[in-house]
Image (cartoon, rainbow, N blue to C red):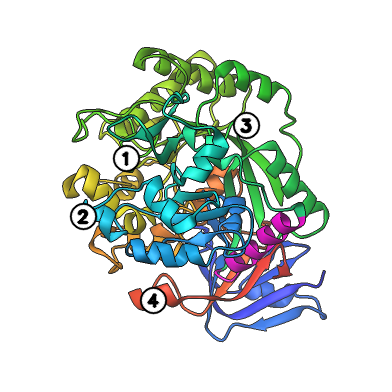
Amino acid sequence: MRDLLLRGGVVRTLDPALGTVSAVLVSDGRVAALGDDALAAASTDARIVELDGRTVLPGLNDAHLHLAFHAAAGPEFCVDLSTAADLDAVARALAGAPEGEWIVGRGWRETTVAEFADGRAMPSRTWLDGVTGSRPAVLHHASSHQVWCNSAALARAGITAATRDPVAGSLVRDAAGEPTGVLVESAQELVAGLVPPPSREERLDAIVRAMARLNGLGMTSLTDPIVPPGLWQDYRDLHAADRLRMRVTALLHWNWPSPTTSAADLAGFLDSTDFSVGDDLLRIGGIKLFADGVPTHCTAWMHTQYADGGHGSLVTAGEDDSARLAELHELVAVAHRRRVRAQVHVTGDRAADAVVDAIEAAQAADPWPDARHALIHGTFLSPDVLGRLARGGIGVITSSLMRTYSGPSMVRILGAARWSSAFPARALLDHGVMVADSSDAPVTVPDWRRGVATFTGSPGPNEFSAVSSPLTREEAVRLWTTGPAWLERSSGTLSLGAVGDLAVLDHDPFTASGLDLLRTRSELTVLGGRVL
Protein backbone atom coordinates (compact mmCIF):
# COMPACT_ATOMS: atom_id res chain seq x y z
CA MET A 1 0.00 0.00 0.00
CA ARG A 2 1.39 3.42 -0.98
CA ASP A 3 2.03 6.05 1.65
CA LEU A 4 -0.75 8.63 1.86
CA LEU A 5 0.22 12.23 2.56
CA LEU A 6 -2.42 14.87 3.25
CA ARG A 7 -1.05 18.41 3.45
CA GLY A 8 -2.07 22.03 3.54
CA GLY A 9 -5.13 21.79 5.77
CA VAL A 10 -6.43 21.74 9.32
CA VAL A 11 -5.62 18.32 10.76
CA ARG A 12 -7.42 18.05 14.09
CA THR A 13 -5.60 15.15 15.72
CA LEU A 14 -7.79 15.24 18.89
CA ASP A 15 -4.62 14.30 20.77
CA PRO A 16 -4.25 16.98 23.48
CA ALA A 17 -0.46 16.79 23.22
CA LEU A 18 -0.46 17.35 19.46
CA GLY A 19 -3.42 19.64 18.85
CA THR A 20 -3.88 20.82 15.28
CA VAL A 21 -1.27 20.36 12.55
CA SER A 22 -1.21 21.00 8.80
CA ALA A 23 -0.28 17.57 7.46
CA VAL A 24 -0.54 13.87 8.21
CA LEU A 25 1.28 10.88 6.73
CA VAL A 26 -0.27 7.40 6.78
CA SER A 27 2.11 4.52 6.10
CA ASP A 28 1.39 0.79 6.38
CA GLY A 29 -2.09 1.62 7.58
CA ARG A 30 -1.06 3.81 10.51
CA VAL A 31 -0.24 7.43 11.27
CA ALA A 32 3.50 7.67 10.65
CA ALA A 33 4.20 11.41 10.94
CA LEU A 34 2.49 14.76 11.48
CA GLY A 35 3.10 18.37 10.50
CA ASP A 36 6.47 19.18 8.97
CA ASP A 37 7.70 15.71 9.87
CA ALA A 38 5.03 14.26 7.60
CA LEU A 39 6.27 16.32 4.66
CA ALA A 40 9.83 15.15 5.23
CA ALA A 41 9.03 11.48 5.84
CA ALA A 42 6.76 10.81 2.84
CA SER A 43 8.15 8.35 0.32
CA THR A 44 8.82 9.52 -3.24
CA ASP A 45 5.87 7.51 -4.57
CA ALA A 46 3.43 8.61 -1.87
CA ARG A 47 -0.07 9.54 -2.91
CA ILE A 48 -0.37 13.26 -2.13
CA VAL A 49 -3.68 14.91 -1.30
CA GLU A 50 -3.73 18.70 -1.34
CA LEU A 51 -6.21 19.70 1.36
CA ASP A 52 -6.49 23.34 0.28
CA GLY A 53 -7.53 24.34 3.79
CA ARG A 54 -10.02 21.53 4.34
CA THR A 55 -10.37 19.85 7.72
CA VAL A 56 -9.20 16.38 8.63
CA LEU A 57 -10.70 14.47 11.56
CA PRO A 58 -10.10 10.96 12.82
CA GLY A 59 -12.67 8.65 11.23
CA LEU A 60 -16.08 9.08 12.84
CA ASN A 61 -17.38 6.26 15.05
CA ASP A 62 -21.00 5.44 15.93
CA ALA A 63 -21.01 3.76 19.34
CA HIS A 64 -24.41 2.08 18.89
CA LEU A 65 -25.61 1.35 15.37
CA HIS A 66 -27.48 -1.82 14.41
CA LEU A 67 -25.76 -2.16 11.05
CA ALA A 68 -27.55 -5.27 9.79
CA PHE A 69 -30.95 -4.04 11.03
CA HIS A 70 -30.27 -0.67 9.39
CA ALA A 71 -29.38 -2.44 6.15
CA ALA A 72 -32.51 -4.60 6.34
CA ALA A 73 -34.66 -1.46 6.64
CA GLY A 74 -33.73 -0.45 3.11
CA PRO A 75 -36.43 0.06 0.45
CA GLU A 76 -35.66 -3.25 -1.24
CA PHE A 77 -36.90 -5.08 1.86
CA CYS A 78 -39.11 -2.75 3.83
CA VAL A 79 -41.71 0.04 3.55
CA ASP A 80 -40.51 3.29 5.12
CA LEU A 81 -43.28 4.66 7.37
CA SER A 82 -41.18 7.28 9.16
CA THR A 83 -42.66 10.20 7.21
CA ALA A 84 -46.27 8.98 7.14
CA ALA A 85 -48.26 11.91 8.56
CA ASP A 86 -51.64 10.17 8.68
CA LEU A 87 -53.32 6.84 7.99
CA ASP A 88 -53.90 7.73 4.35
CA ALA A 89 -50.12 8.15 4.00
CA VAL A 90 -49.57 4.81 5.73
CA ALA A 91 -51.96 3.18 3.26
CA ARG A 92 -50.24 4.75 0.25
CA ALA A 93 -46.84 3.62 1.48
CA LEU A 94 -48.02 0.07 2.06
CA ALA A 95 -49.53 -0.05 -1.43
CA GLY A 96 -45.98 0.23 -2.75
CA ALA A 97 -44.58 -2.61 -0.64
CA PRO A 98 -41.93 -4.80 -2.28
CA GLU A 99 -43.25 -8.02 -3.75
CA GLY A 100 -43.15 -11.08 -1.57
CA GLU A 101 -45.18 -13.21 0.75
CA TRP A 102 -45.11 -10.68 3.61
CA ILE A 103 -45.44 -6.91 3.88
CA VAL A 104 -42.81 -5.49 6.21
CA GLY A 105 -42.73 -1.84 7.29
CA ARG A 106 -40.75 0.24 9.73
CA GLY A 107 -40.68 3.66 11.32
CA TRP A 108 -44.24 4.52 12.42
CA ARG A 109 -44.77 6.44 15.66
CA GLU A 110 -47.91 7.34 17.58
CA THR A 111 -47.02 11.03 17.48
CA THR A 112 -46.37 11.32 13.76
CA VAL A 113 -49.54 9.61 12.46
CA ALA A 114 -52.19 12.29 12.96
CA GLU A 115 -55.06 9.98 13.94
CA PHE A 116 -52.92 8.31 16.61
CA ALA A 117 -51.50 11.61 17.86
CA ASP A 118 -54.89 13.22 18.50
CA GLY A 119 -56.59 10.09 19.82
CA ARG A 120 -59.03 9.54 16.95
CA ALA A 121 -57.64 6.04 16.38
CA MET A 122 -55.19 3.48 17.72
CA PRO A 123 -53.09 1.00 15.75
CA SER A 124 -55.36 -1.96 15.03
CA ARG A 125 -55.35 -5.11 12.95
CA THR A 126 -58.82 -4.31 11.58
CA TRP A 127 -57.71 -1.04 9.95
CA LEU A 128 -54.59 -2.75 8.63
CA ASP A 129 -56.67 -5.61 7.22
CA GLY A 130 -58.53 -3.14 5.01
CA VAL A 131 -55.24 -2.00 3.46
CA THR A 132 -53.29 -5.25 3.27
CA GLY A 133 -56.01 -7.87 2.78
CA SER A 134 -54.93 -11.47 3.20
CA ARG A 135 -51.22 -10.78 2.79
CA PRO A 136 -49.60 -10.97 6.27
CA ALA A 137 -48.13 -7.65 7.42
CA VAL A 138 -45.83 -6.67 10.28
CA LEU A 139 -44.98 -3.00 10.81
CA HIS A 140 -42.08 -2.28 13.15
CA HIS A 141 -42.39 0.74 15.45
CA ALA A 142 -39.56 3.26 15.10
CA SER A 143 -38.29 2.28 18.55
CA SER A 144 -37.96 -1.40 17.55
CA HIS A 145 -39.79 -2.25 20.79
CA GLN A 146 -43.19 -3.10 19.30
CA VAL A 147 -44.84 -4.20 16.05
CA TRP A 148 -48.27 -3.62 14.50
CA CYS A 149 -49.68 -6.65 12.69
CA ASN A 150 -52.72 -7.50 10.63
CA SER A 151 -55.07 -10.43 11.18
CA ALA A 152 -53.32 -12.61 8.61
CA ALA A 153 -50.02 -12.23 10.48
CA LEU A 154 -51.66 -13.03 13.83
CA ALA A 155 -53.26 -16.11 12.28
CA ARG A 156 -49.89 -17.30 10.94
CA ALA A 157 -48.57 -17.04 14.50
CA GLY A 158 -51.60 -18.75 16.01
CA ILE A 159 -52.32 -15.71 18.18
CA THR A 160 -55.83 -15.56 19.64
CA ALA A 161 -57.52 -14.14 22.70
CA ALA A 162 -56.33 -17.25 24.56
CA THR A 163 -52.65 -16.58 23.81
CA ARG A 164 -50.73 -15.74 26.98
CA ASP A 165 -48.26 -12.89 27.16
CA PRO A 166 -44.66 -14.12 26.86
CA VAL A 167 -42.00 -13.30 29.46
CA ALA A 168 -40.97 -9.61 29.14
CA GLY A 169 -43.61 -8.93 26.49
CA SER A 170 -47.31 -8.30 25.99
CA LEU A 171 -50.14 -8.46 23.48
CA VAL A 172 -52.17 -5.26 23.46
CA ARG A 173 -55.86 -6.27 23.77
CA ASP A 174 -59.17 -4.51 23.28
CA ALA A 175 -61.97 -4.30 25.84
CA ALA A 176 -63.16 -7.78 24.88
CA GLY A 177 -59.70 -9.28 25.37
CA GLU A 178 -59.02 -9.70 21.65
CA PRO A 179 -55.51 -8.91 20.37
CA THR A 180 -55.42 -5.55 18.60
CA GLY A 181 -52.40 -6.52 16.50
CA VAL A 182 -49.86 -4.55 18.55
CA LEU A 183 -47.17 -6.75 20.13
CA VAL A 184 -44.77 -5.20 22.66
CA GLU A 185 -41.16 -6.13 23.55
CA SER A 186 -40.54 -9.92 23.42
CA ALA A 187 -44.02 -10.57 22.00
CA GLN A 188 -42.80 -9.11 18.69
CA GLU A 189 -41.02 -12.35 17.91
CA LEU A 190 -44.29 -14.29 17.86
CA VAL A 191 -44.89 -12.74 14.44
CA ALA A 192 -41.64 -11.09 13.32
CA GLY A 193 -39.83 -14.40 13.63
CA LEU A 194 -42.07 -15.88 10.93
CA VAL A 195 -41.02 -13.42 8.22
CA PRO A 196 -38.69 -15.21 5.76
CA PRO A 197 -35.27 -13.55 5.89
CA PRO A 198 -33.51 -12.24 2.78
CA SER A 199 -31.13 -14.62 1.07
CA ARG A 200 -27.54 -14.68 2.29
CA GLU A 201 -26.37 -12.80 -0.82
CA GLU A 202 -29.08 -10.14 -0.44
CA ARG A 203 -28.28 -9.76 3.25
CA LEU A 204 -24.53 -9.33 2.77
CA ASP A 205 -24.91 -6.97 -0.18
CA ALA A 206 -27.27 -4.77 1.85
CA ILE A 207 -24.77 -4.55 4.71
CA VAL A 208 -22.01 -3.48 2.31
CA ARG A 209 -24.26 -0.81 0.79
CA ALA A 210 -25.10 0.51 4.25
CA MET A 211 -21.41 0.77 5.13
CA ALA A 212 -20.75 2.68 1.90
CA ARG A 213 -23.44 5.22 2.79
CA LEU A 214 -21.86 5.72 6.20
CA ASN A 215 -18.43 6.15 4.60
CA GLY A 216 -19.88 9.11 2.72
CA LEU A 217 -20.33 10.86 6.07
CA GLY A 218 -16.74 10.16 7.05
CA MET A 219 -17.60 7.21 9.28
CA THR A 220 -15.06 4.41 9.62
CA SER A 221 -16.09 2.55 12.80
CA LEU A 222 -19.19 1.38 14.63
CA THR A 223 -20.37 -0.91 17.37
CA ASP A 224 -23.22 -3.22 16.41
CA PRO A 225 -24.93 -3.84 19.75
CA ILE A 226 -27.03 -6.90 18.93
CA VAL A 227 -25.07 -9.60 17.11
CA PRO A 228 -26.56 -13.11 17.27
CA PRO A 229 -24.38 -16.02 16.11
CA GLY A 230 -25.72 -15.92 12.54
CA LEU A 231 -24.91 -12.24 12.12
CA TRP A 232 -21.45 -12.75 13.62
CA GLN A 233 -20.84 -15.32 10.88
CA ASP A 234 -22.09 -12.85 8.26
CA TYR A 235 -19.56 -10.29 9.45
CA ARG A 236 -16.79 -12.90 9.43
CA ASP A 237 -17.72 -13.86 5.87
CA LEU A 238 -17.64 -10.22 4.75
CA HIS A 239 -14.24 -9.80 6.38
CA ALA A 240 -12.87 -12.95 4.73
CA ALA A 241 -14.08 -11.62 1.36
CA ASP A 242 -12.42 -8.21 2.01
CA ARG A 243 -15.81 -6.49 1.89
CA LEU A 244 -15.79 -4.72 5.26
CA ARG A 245 -15.67 -0.96 4.71
CA MET A 246 -15.75 -0.09 8.41
CA ARG A 247 -14.30 -1.38 11.66
CA VAL A 248 -17.04 -3.35 13.36
CA THR A 249 -17.10 -4.06 17.07
CA ALA A 250 -19.75 -6.67 17.84
CA LEU A 251 -21.71 -7.03 21.06
CA LEU A 252 -22.97 -10.59 21.16
CA HIS A 253 -26.58 -11.35 22.05
CA TRP A 254 -28.30 -14.72 21.83
CA ASN A 255 -32.00 -14.12 22.52
CA TRP A 256 -33.11 -11.18 20.36
CA PRO A 257 -35.82 -10.01 19.94
CA SER A 258 -36.53 -11.15 23.47
CA PRO A 259 -34.71 -8.83 25.88
CA THR A 260 -34.64 -11.54 28.52
CA THR A 261 -31.60 -13.78 28.98
CA SER A 262 -31.32 -15.98 32.05
CA ALA A 263 -28.06 -15.92 33.98
CA ALA A 264 -27.76 -19.69 33.59
CA ASP A 265 -28.16 -19.49 29.81
CA LEU A 266 -25.74 -16.56 29.61
CA ALA A 267 -23.06 -18.53 31.48
CA GLY A 268 -23.42 -21.34 28.95
CA PHE A 269 -23.24 -18.96 26.00
CA LEU A 270 -20.13 -17.24 27.33
CA ASP A 271 -18.35 -20.47 28.18
CA SER A 272 -18.87 -21.77 24.65
CA THR A 273 -17.74 -18.58 22.89
CA ASP A 274 -14.19 -17.72 21.85
CA PHE A 275 -13.87 -14.00 22.57
CA SER A 276 -10.29 -13.87 21.27
CA VAL A 277 -11.20 -14.21 17.59
CA GLY A 278 -11.02 -11.16 15.37
CA ASP A 279 -8.59 -8.36 14.65
CA ASP A 280 -8.60 -4.57 14.50
CA LEU A 281 -11.16 -4.60 11.67
CA LEU A 282 -13.67 -7.04 13.18
CA ARG A 283 -13.75 -7.97 16.83
CA ILE A 284 -16.03 -8.96 19.70
CA GLY A 285 -16.31 -6.09 22.15
CA GLY A 286 -18.47 -7.81 24.76
CA ILE A 287 -22.16 -8.56 25.20
CA LYS A 288 -25.45 -6.70 25.18
CA LEU A 289 -27.85 -7.02 28.10
CA PHE A 290 -31.25 -5.40 28.66
CA ALA A 291 -32.35 -3.91 31.97
CA ASP A 292 -35.67 -2.34 30.97
CA GLY A 293 -37.73 -1.21 27.98
CA VAL A 294 -38.41 2.30 26.68
CA PRO A 295 -40.33 5.29 28.11
CA THR A 296 -42.55 5.70 25.04
CA HIS A 297 -44.15 2.32 25.80
CA CYS A 298 -44.09 2.90 29.59
CA THR A 299 -41.71 -0.07 29.91
CA ALA A 300 -38.70 1.91 31.19
CA TRP A 301 -38.27 1.35 34.95
CA MET A 302 -38.76 4.80 36.48
CA HIS A 303 -38.80 6.21 40.01
CA THR A 304 -41.71 8.51 39.10
CA GLN A 305 -45.01 6.97 38.08
CA TYR A 306 -46.38 7.14 34.56
CA ALA A 307 -49.81 8.67 34.05
CA ASP A 308 -51.42 5.22 34.33
CA GLY A 309 -49.84 4.72 37.73
CA GLY A 310 -47.20 2.18 36.74
CA HIS A 311 -43.43 2.49 37.02
CA GLY A 312 -42.42 0.09 34.24
CA SER A 313 -40.14 -2.74 35.27
CA LEU A 314 -36.95 -4.60 34.65
CA VAL A 315 -37.13 -7.07 31.77
CA THR A 316 -34.92 -9.66 33.42
CA ALA A 317 -36.44 -12.99 34.47
CA GLY A 318 -38.44 -13.06 37.70
CA GLU A 319 -41.96 -12.88 39.07
CA ASP A 320 -41.52 -9.59 40.92
CA ASP A 321 -39.15 -6.62 41.20
CA SER A 322 -37.03 -8.33 43.84
CA ALA A 323 -36.48 -11.45 41.73
CA ARG A 324 -35.82 -9.45 38.57
CA LEU A 325 -33.30 -7.29 40.43
CA ALA A 326 -31.46 -10.35 41.73
CA GLU A 327 -31.34 -11.77 38.21
CA LEU A 328 -29.92 -8.49 36.87
CA HIS A 329 -27.12 -8.63 39.46
CA GLU A 330 -26.33 -12.22 38.50
CA LEU A 331 -26.28 -11.44 34.76
CA VAL A 332 -23.72 -8.68 35.29
CA ALA A 333 -21.70 -10.86 37.66
CA VAL A 334 -21.66 -13.77 35.19
CA ALA A 335 -20.11 -11.57 32.51
CA HIS A 336 -17.81 -9.71 34.89
CA ARG A 337 -16.34 -12.89 36.41
CA ARG A 338 -15.45 -14.07 32.91
CA ARG A 339 -13.89 -10.72 32.04
CA VAL A 340 -16.49 -10.04 29.37
CA ARG A 341 -17.53 -6.42 29.04
CA ALA A 342 -21.26 -5.79 29.40
CA GLN A 343 -23.14 -2.93 27.80
CA VAL A 344 -26.62 -2.70 29.29
CA HIS A 345 -29.67 -1.12 27.69
CA VAL A 346 -31.13 1.19 30.30
CA THR A 347 -33.57 4.08 29.80
CA GLY A 348 -35.33 4.59 33.15
CA ASP A 349 -33.59 6.25 36.11
CA ARG A 350 -34.59 3.46 38.48
CA ALA A 351 -33.16 0.89 36.08
CA ALA A 352 -29.94 2.91 35.77
CA ASP A 353 -29.52 2.92 39.53
CA ALA A 354 -30.05 -0.85 39.54
CA VAL A 355 -27.46 -1.48 36.83
CA VAL A 356 -24.86 0.68 38.57
CA ASP A 357 -25.61 -1.19 41.81
CA ALA A 358 -25.02 -4.48 39.97
CA ILE A 359 -21.73 -3.34 38.43
CA GLU A 360 -20.47 -2.00 41.74
CA ALA A 361 -21.38 -5.29 43.44
CA ALA A 362 -19.57 -7.29 40.77
CA GLN A 363 -16.46 -5.10 41.12
CA ALA A 364 -16.50 -5.38 44.89
CA ALA A 365 -16.69 -9.18 44.73
CA ASP A 366 -14.09 -9.54 41.96
CA PRO A 367 -12.12 -6.36 41.12
CA TRP A 368 -11.49 -5.71 37.43
CA PRO A 369 -10.07 -2.17 37.41
CA ASP A 370 -10.43 -1.51 33.67
CA ALA A 371 -13.69 -3.32 32.90
CA ARG A 372 -15.30 -0.42 31.00
CA HIS A 373 -18.85 -1.70 31.35
CA ALA A 374 -21.36 0.82 29.99
CA LEU A 375 -24.94 2.01 30.11
CA ILE A 376 -26.59 2.17 26.69
CA HIS A 377 -28.81 5.24 26.26
CA GLY A 378 -28.84 6.36 29.91
CA THR A 379 -31.90 8.34 28.90
CA PHE A 380 -32.88 9.35 32.43
CA LEU A 381 -30.32 9.32 35.23
CA SER A 382 -30.68 10.15 38.92
CA PRO A 383 -28.38 13.02 39.97
CA ASP A 384 -26.77 10.80 42.60
CA VAL A 385 -25.68 8.22 40.05
CA LEU A 386 -23.44 10.56 38.02
CA GLY A 387 -20.54 10.52 40.46
CA ARG A 388 -20.86 6.78 40.91
CA LEU A 389 -20.54 6.27 37.16
CA ALA A 390 -17.31 8.27 37.12
CA ARG A 391 -15.81 6.56 40.17
CA GLY A 392 -16.68 3.13 38.80
CA GLY A 393 -15.23 3.78 35.36
CA ILE A 394 -18.65 3.04 33.83
CA GLY A 395 -19.25 4.59 30.41
CA VAL A 396 -22.52 5.96 29.04
CA ILE A 397 -23.56 5.75 25.39
CA THR A 398 -26.01 8.57 24.78
CA SER A 399 -28.52 8.80 21.94
CA SER A 400 -28.61 12.46 20.94
CA LEU A 401 -30.55 11.87 17.73
CA MET A 402 -33.49 10.58 19.73
CA ARG A 403 -34.04 14.13 20.98
CA THR A 404 -35.29 14.91 17.47
CA TYR A 405 -36.90 11.63 16.53
CA SER A 406 -38.41 10.52 19.85
CA GLY A 407 -39.05 13.93 21.43
CA PRO A 408 -42.76 14.23 20.56
CA SER A 409 -43.49 10.71 21.85
CA MET A 410 -41.46 11.26 25.02
CA VAL A 411 -43.18 14.57 25.83
CA ARG A 412 -46.56 12.96 25.27
CA ILE A 413 -45.76 10.26 27.85
CA LEU A 414 -43.53 12.08 30.35
CA GLY A 415 -44.10 15.82 29.88
CA ALA A 416 -41.76 18.53 28.61
CA ALA A 417 -40.06 19.15 31.96
CA ARG A 418 -39.03 15.52 32.35
CA TRP A 419 -37.89 15.26 28.74
CA SER A 420 -35.65 18.30 29.14
CA SER A 421 -33.36 16.25 31.40
CA ALA A 422 -32.94 13.32 28.98
CA PHE A 423 -29.46 12.29 27.82
CA PRO A 424 -27.57 14.63 30.20
CA ALA A 425 -24.28 14.73 28.29
CA ARG A 426 -23.16 18.00 29.90
CA ALA A 427 -23.66 16.72 33.44
CA LEU A 428 -21.99 13.40 32.61
CA LEU A 429 -18.86 15.09 31.23
CA ASP A 430 -18.74 17.54 34.13
CA HIS A 431 -18.69 14.59 36.53
CA GLY A 432 -15.86 12.94 34.60
CA VAL A 433 -17.88 10.13 33.01
CA MET A 434 -16.63 8.70 29.72
CA VAL A 435 -19.36 9.38 27.16
CA ALA A 436 -19.88 8.22 23.59
CA ASP A 437 -22.76 9.23 21.35
CA SER A 438 -24.71 7.16 18.86
CA SER A 439 -27.56 7.00 16.39
CA ASP A 440 -29.18 3.68 17.39
CA ALA A 441 -30.06 3.28 13.69
CA PRO A 442 -32.49 2.16 12.38
CA VAL A 443 -34.35 3.82 15.27
CA THR A 444 -33.01 7.08 13.82
CA VAL A 445 -31.17 7.99 10.64
CA PRO A 446 -27.43 7.64 11.39
CA ASP A 447 -25.86 11.10 11.18
CA TRP A 448 -23.07 12.24 13.50
CA ARG A 449 -23.54 15.81 12.25
CA ARG A 450 -27.08 15.95 13.70
CA GLY A 451 -25.74 14.49 16.94
CA VAL A 452 -23.07 17.19 17.23
CA ALA A 453 -25.60 19.89 16.36
CA THR A 454 -28.05 18.60 18.96
CA PHE A 455 -25.66 18.46 21.89
CA THR A 456 -24.10 21.84 21.05
CA GLY A 457 -27.45 23.61 21.00
CA SER A 458 -27.65 24.37 17.28
CA PRO A 459 -31.17 25.05 16.04
CA GLY A 460 -32.92 21.73 15.50
CA PRO A 461 -35.76 20.53 13.31
CA ASN A 462 -38.22 20.71 16.22
CA GLU A 463 -38.49 22.11 19.71
CA PHE A 464 -37.92 18.70 21.28
CA SER A 465 -34.29 18.48 20.12
CA ALA A 466 -33.05 21.47 22.17
CA VAL A 467 -30.72 20.92 25.14
CA SER A 468 -30.50 23.28 28.08
CA SER A 469 -26.79 22.70 28.82
CA PRO A 470 -24.88 22.49 25.54
CA LEU A 471 -21.44 21.06 24.89
CA THR A 472 -18.65 22.73 22.98
CA ARG A 473 -18.14 21.59 19.41
CA GLU A 474 -14.93 19.78 20.37
CA GLU A 475 -16.65 17.96 23.22
CA ALA A 476 -19.46 16.87 20.94
CA VAL A 477 -17.09 15.68 18.20
CA ARG A 478 -15.18 13.65 20.77
CA LEU A 479 -18.37 11.76 21.53
CA TRP A 480 -18.09 10.39 17.97
CA THR A 481 -14.33 9.75 18.05
CA THR A 482 -12.40 9.39 21.30
CA GLY A 483 -15.48 8.44 23.34
CA PRO A 484 -16.34 5.30 21.36
CA ALA A 485 -12.63 4.51 21.09
CA TRP A 486 -12.35 4.43 24.89
CA LEU A 487 -15.03 1.75 25.00
CA GLU A 488 -13.20 -0.21 22.30
CA ARG A 489 -9.78 0.30 23.89
CA SER A 490 -8.51 2.10 20.77
CA SER A 491 -7.43 5.73 20.31
CA GLY A 492 -9.91 7.69 18.16
CA THR A 493 -7.14 10.19 17.49
CA LEU A 494 -4.58 10.85 14.78
CA SER A 495 -1.69 10.25 17.17
CA LEU A 496 1.55 8.67 16.01
CA GLY A 497 1.02 4.95 15.56
CA ALA A 498 -2.78 5.20 15.57
CA VAL A 499 -4.72 3.47 12.81
CA GLY A 500 -4.90 5.59 9.68
CA ASP A 501 -8.66 6.21 9.76
CA LEU A 502 -9.64 9.73 8.77
CA ALA A 503 -12.17 11.92 7.02
CA VAL A 504 -11.47 15.00 4.93
CA LEU A 505 -14.43 17.31 5.49
CA ASP A 506 -15.57 20.25 3.41
CA HIS A 507 -16.48 22.19 6.57
CA ASP A 508 -14.71 22.33 9.93
CA PRO A 509 -17.21 20.98 12.47
CA PHE A 510 -15.45 22.94 15.22
CA THR A 511 -16.27 26.29 13.61
CA ALA A 512 -18.96 25.79 10.93
CA SER A 513 -22.30 27.53 11.23
CA GLY A 514 -25.19 25.34 12.28
CA LEU A 515 -26.46 24.95 8.73
CA ASP A 516 -22.98 24.28 7.32
CA LEU A 517 -22.39 21.67 10.01
CA LEU A 518 -25.48 19.76 8.90
CA ARG A 519 -24.34 20.01 5.26
CA THR A 520 -20.81 18.78 5.99
CA ARG A 521 -19.71 15.85 3.89
CA SER A 522 -16.57 13.80 3.60
CA GLU A 523 -14.67 14.38 0.38
CA LEU A 524 -12.20 11.62 1.22
CA THR A 525 -12.70 8.80 3.72
CA VAL A 526 -9.75 6.59 4.61
CA LEU A 527 -9.72 3.30 6.53
CA GLY A 528 -6.30 2.09 7.62
CA GLY A 529 -4.65 4.06 4.82
CA ARG A 530 -7.09 2.65 2.24
CA VAL A 531 -9.08 5.28 0.37
CA LEU A 532 -12.72 4.23 0.45
Determine crowd level at label 4: few under 14, some 14-19, many 20+ residues with C-alpha closer than 10 A: some
Residue 254, label in figure: 3
Identity, as a three-letter code, of the amino acid under mark 2: Asp
x and y, in percent, of residue 438 in the image: 47, 52
Question: In terms of sequence position, does the residue under pointer 1 or pointer 3 come before the other?
Answer: 3
Badge 3 density bin: few <14, some 14–19, many ≥20, Cα 10 Å:
many
Against 162, is 112 above or below? below
Task: Say which amino acid is labelled 3.
Answer: Trp
Residue 142 at x, y = what percent? 42, 52
Q: Circle 3 — which element?
A: loop
- Location of mark 4 (residue): 512
The disc placed on residue 57 is: none
Q: Which residue is mark 1?
A: 295
The magenta span reads 201-217
Packing grade of label 2 (10 A; few <14, some 14-19, many >=20) is: few
Is label 2 in contact with label 3 (beta carbons under 8 Å)?
no
Cα distance, mark 3 to mark 4? 43 Å
Q: Is residue 314 left or right of residue 457?
A: right
